[in-house]
Image (cartoon, helix red, strand yellow):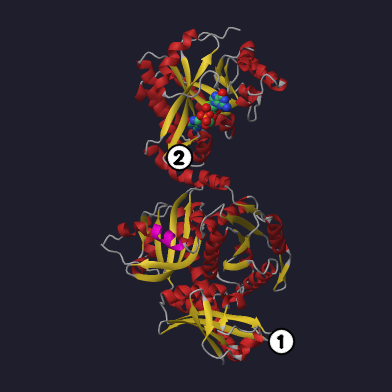
Amino acid sequence: MGMLVLECKPGPVFTALNRIPDWFLQIHSAPLGADSVLDVAAIFPFIAHFIEDAEVFWRNPVEARLGSGIWTELDEQGNQHQLEAYALQYQNSRILLLVDLTASFDARHHVYQRAREIALAQERLVMSLQRQQRKLQLQIQGLLARDESLHAIAERVRQHASAVMVCRPDGSVELLNQALMDIYPVSGNNGTRAEHSLLKQWVNEAEALYPEIHRVIETGASWEGEFESSAGSDKKWVRLLIGPVLDQEQRVTHLVCVANDISGLREPAIELERVTDYDFTTQLPNRRHFWRVLTRAIDECRASGEKLVLLYLDVDHFKRINDSLDHQAGDLLLGTLSSRLRSNIKKTDFIAHLGGDEFALMLRTSQRTLDLLPVAERLLKVVRQPLVVDGHNVSITASLGIACFPEHGNDAVGLMKRADLAMYHAKQRGRDQHLMFSRSLDEAFFNRTVIQKDLGNALSGGELRLVYQPQICLGANSFLRLEALLRWHHPVRGLISPAVFVPVAEESDLINQIGNWVLEEACRQARQFMDRNIQVVMSVNVSARQLRAGDFVQRVQQVLADTGLDPSQLELEVTETTLLDNMETRAESLQQLQELGVSIALDDFGSGFSSLNYLKNLPVDRLKIDQVFIQEIPHDEESKTITASVVKLAHELHMTVVAEGVETWDQLRFLQGIGCDYVQGFLLFRPLPPEEIGAVFASLASLRFDS
Ligand code: C2E
Ligand code: MG
Ligand code: MG
């Protein structure tokens, strides 16, 4: 077989301990120095990384030997040689063996072929397990959606062979079955308490292989994968499916988790992967291999100052395509796709198949700026090229997320997360496109998910406050009108604007809880001002969902009764869009409120549909002209005309008018000229904490706007 035995000395330099075999000389005929020193990494660039691994191994040999896996070299006659390297320790010497396996390669190839068949068979088993898990999860989801009792669901899954756990998004367990306790032995007899941390454990364990898991779950999608999990003192390979149950507002109410212990299946597969490190379907490096290469490349780039670009490609609607083909055709499609991608990148770039329909590409460059656009376009274009699979024309597209080291992430997991997030946004924007990560994506994502998560605590944690912005009467008035505006002091992110979090709260029932709190707090505060002889009318913003809730009128009545505030001192602000969905019912509620003595203001007037016609039929006392008009005064003639005619019309309908967003004296003078009743804006007062309102009230009499 002819092997070359080398000893490694610090450097690392390698000296040959035996006669240089012929095959080596056929590949590398350059004369050796007298001391037979070889620069192995330079002669065989393919194993440069392996040699680094070998150095780690020699420092701390945990196994008998470390193998490089087989690689191919061409000799000077153009013949192929299949080579393999092994690192081992022999009597304190660091030994590197280089073996030419060409002769036995055919035989080995056979073994690989066989291994591949076994792996495929296993893959099929995993696929069937996957189908079973999905079916079970859908069943449970259906039961939950139909409000089946947890007890009844528990009864149904009690003896199921798959482990089942249903929990809340925070991990608190609602039910679990015997199979789960078989995998994760539970101490104590009521069981559920010990499992409260299981969801968190799973996410942490899976994250190292699947950094996207947080994002996937937080966005209400289902996630599945295979990873190693600690169960008591054991380690087990688990296949886990987490499927969220959404309510009508698309908020996650439960997570249905289905798990199976696949250690028996995984171990031989891992052994195979360890030998090959390649994914069988696509013949590309697999996820494990990819992580190793990426982690090392980042370390190298950190040292050398090179840049590294990570592209994360995910086929659009792959599931749909895959379901319409059979399993093998799906594999074929992935195989074709991977060879197309591979032939469109440079030899020095790295591509891996991460599993399913996901690919990752890694590019390295010493250039300061790398023009990624053509690369990304080219990759998407080759994906788009029509494909024939099994006689069917299949057209596919993909979404591509891009993240760069070091700008976007400082380690492999961070970088992958960012590339995944960019990919997710590319999909959100309509798929078949690429997107580079940017901080704003992080923020957009934060708005949706973190806000949704944290807003619940905001209320109970006392993080919400109200500030009060005076609305100043341009004529004489002894009452001070105040608009209550919400502020969120987030413990980490600082002050968050209601323009950001109110729309998120409005997507769910949270707006009702928050709205109720605002109403109570504003009325309580108004009452307190009155007790201190500060005469106020308090204006409170009401969102569409609050008004839609059947008991809103009663609630207002109750709050007035509880706080002892006179109804005439409360005003509710609604927007046009709030009224649009069901004008008649809304008008009826407003009417009832008016009958209580509460006044109604139409907020942001002019920004929406602004049909002046329907105003006649609405029980509204005041109009608030939207800031966009006021801010164009006095330069924009149209805004001036609109504002003036709105004031006129409102007066004809016996409504008073508030101008919002008044920032300059010119604006104020114009508004005064057209007979506008109230002004609200930074020119006079910003929204203020309650302590400062007393002083504003005291200064009212001295405020004069005579032109
Ligand atoms: P809005 O009801 O139209 O409130 C007026 C907004 O204009 C406030 O923004 C206020 O700070 C701002 N503003 C006042 N004067 C000026 C000015 O001179 N220039 C400029 N550029 N802006 C001015 P804020 O407090 O950020 O609130 C934004 C929106 O959030 C509010 O618009 C309202 O729709 C909503 N919101 C605030 N508090 C609540 C609440 O308690 N419940 C509900 N449902 N929505 C609320
Ligand atoms: Mg308002
Ligand atoms: Mg407004």
Q: Quick check: 356 above or below 636?
A: below
Label 2 amino acid? Leu
Q: Is residue 613 above or below residue 1?
A: above
> Dot 1 corresponds to which residue?
77
- Dominant secondary-structure state across the stretch colored magenta: helix
Which residue is at a point 69% across and 55% down the rendered structure image?
371
Viewer-closest of 483 and 348? 348
Q: Which quadrant of the structure image shows residue 281?
A: bottom right
Instruction: Report whether 179 appears left or right of 469.
Output: left
Q: Is 646 located above or below residue 9 in the figure?
A: above
Rendered-image quadrant of the N terminus: bottom right
Label 2 sits on residue: 510
Q: Is residue 450 left or right of residue 646?
A: left
Distance Cα–Cα, label 1 vs label 2:
74 Å
In this view, the residue farthest toward the front is 34
**Kind of residue indicated by mark 1:** Gln
Q: Residue 674, can we see it?
A: yes
Q: Percent from the top left, x then y, of residue 581?
A: 58, 35
CB atoms at circles 1 and 2 under 8 Å apart?
no
> Does residue 205 belong to the magenta stretch?
yes
Residue at point 68%, 22% (across, down): 639
Q: Quadrant of residue 389?
A: bottom right
